[in-house]
């Protein structure tokens, strides 16, 4: 499949951009596990970039092993978005993605992210200005609509294609749904099967395992699938899905010891990049999933939540792995 000039395998797998999750350390761990065809950064504020904000500029740093990768930007002012896109282009990603899908209140209520779905004309204007400002391919990630009564994704897809985007990524929920309820893939399928749509359509939402991934390709004909929240604390999910799509066989779930080793690698990378306190703070959202369904997992998580020491975090994880050393076939 051709995506932004990239030759991808059949049924490609995309790693979703997630704020405070898909930082460089998480991307490293996911890439180490394998199975990802295209990666994304966290979203980057256009205002932060044009004002030389340290946090925003740091998000533009990408490593060669992460390629192909897209840098995602968000904002609600056309000129600022175009200026930010030029700064992103200098970081040399393979493409630039515009975030029209983030449902978080502080983003959407000021008209950015999925808030743009209430102002399609402005969405189109921003997209057109970004496309014209840069030489890189531009993609858009968005949702079905603002709410149940305004699912206008078919109109949006056609209008954004008309101003030059190279692909569209659709999360199968409305903004008001946030992350609740069930993702509606029927509308994603309608966009894909619309004869007016010539660009790749990537589907996102509720894919939490190999069978679900295959179902979305088979039932809706999408050009690719994107994995988001299901990868938090489960960076091996991409490898599992890739193997199933290629062979029809399911890989075994990692053992407790394997999961703990991956968690330790993740912790070490996180601390190396963000310092001891920042790195440990970042890991806390991942620990919940790394340790999910483990006997006494709540007690273990509480110990990790109370610890601000890297060495102590490692000791706790080693104790967990040691406790189940004779249960190497047991999985979480």
Image (tube, helix red, strand yellow):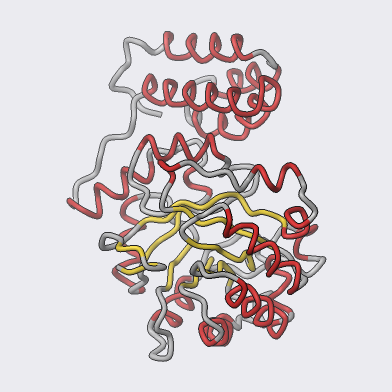
Residue at image location 48% in from the left, 47% down from the top: 230
Q: Nearer the viewer, residue 302 or 259?
A: 259
Residue 310's x, y, as percent?
61, 14
Residue 152's x, y, as percent?
60, 83
Residue 209's x, y, as percent?
37, 49
Q: Nearer the viewer, residue 177 or 156?
A: 156
Residue 274 in the figure: left or right of residue 185: right
Q: Quadrant of residue 176?
A: bottom right
Q: Is residue 152 above or below residue 302?
A: below
Quarter that holds the N terminus: bottom left
Q: Is residue 155 above or below residue 32?
A: below
Residue 310 in the figure: left or right of residue 203: right
- The extreme bottom residue here reads 196
Residue at image location 60% in from the left, 48% down from the top: 60
Quarter that holds the C terminus: top left
Q: Quadrant of residue 102?
A: bottom right
Residue 177's x, y, as percent?
65, 65
Q: Is residue 147 visible?
A: no
């Amino acid at each position: 499949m051709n995506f932004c000039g990239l030759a991808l395998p059949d049924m490609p797998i995309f790693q979703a951009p997630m704020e405070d999750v898909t930082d460089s350390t998480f991307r490293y761990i996911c890439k180490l596990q394998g199975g990802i065809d295209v990666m994304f950064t966290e979203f980057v504020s256009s205002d932060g970039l044009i004002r030389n904000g340290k946090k925003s500029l740091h998000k533009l740093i990408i490593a060669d092993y992460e390629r192909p990768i897209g840098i995602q930007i968000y904002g609600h002012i056309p000129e600022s978005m175009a200026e930010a896109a030029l700064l992103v282009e200098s970081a040399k990603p393979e493409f630039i993605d515009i975030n029209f899908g983030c449902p978080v209140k502080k983003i959407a209520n000021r008209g950015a992210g999925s808030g743009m779905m209430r102002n399609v004309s402005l969405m189109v204007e921003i997209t057109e200005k970004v496309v014209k400002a840069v030489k890189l391919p531009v993609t858009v990630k968005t949702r079905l609509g603002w709410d149940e009564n305004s699912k206008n994704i078919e109109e949006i897809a056609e209008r954004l294609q008309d101003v030059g985007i190279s692909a569209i990524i659709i999360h199968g929920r409305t903004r008001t749904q946030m992350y609740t309820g069930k993702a509606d893939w029927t509308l994603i399928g309608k966009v894909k099967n619309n004869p007016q749509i010539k660009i790749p359509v990537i589907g996102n939402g509720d894919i939490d395992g190999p069978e679900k991934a295959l179902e979305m390709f088979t039932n809706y004909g999408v050009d690719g699938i994107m994995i988001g929240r299901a990868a938090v604390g489960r960076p091996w999910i991409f490898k599992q899905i890739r193997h199933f799509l290629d062979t029809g066989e399911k890989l075994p779930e990692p053992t407790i010891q394997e999961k703990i080793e991956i968690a330790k690698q993740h912790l070490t990378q996180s601390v190396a990049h963000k310092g001891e306190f920042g790195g440990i703070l970042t890991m806390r959202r991942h620990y919940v999933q790394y340790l999910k369904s483990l006997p006494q997992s709540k007690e273990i998580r509480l110990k990790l939540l109370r610890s601000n020491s890297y060495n102590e975090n490692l000791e706790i994880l080693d104790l967990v792995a040691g406790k189940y050393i004779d249960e190497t076939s047991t999985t979480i």
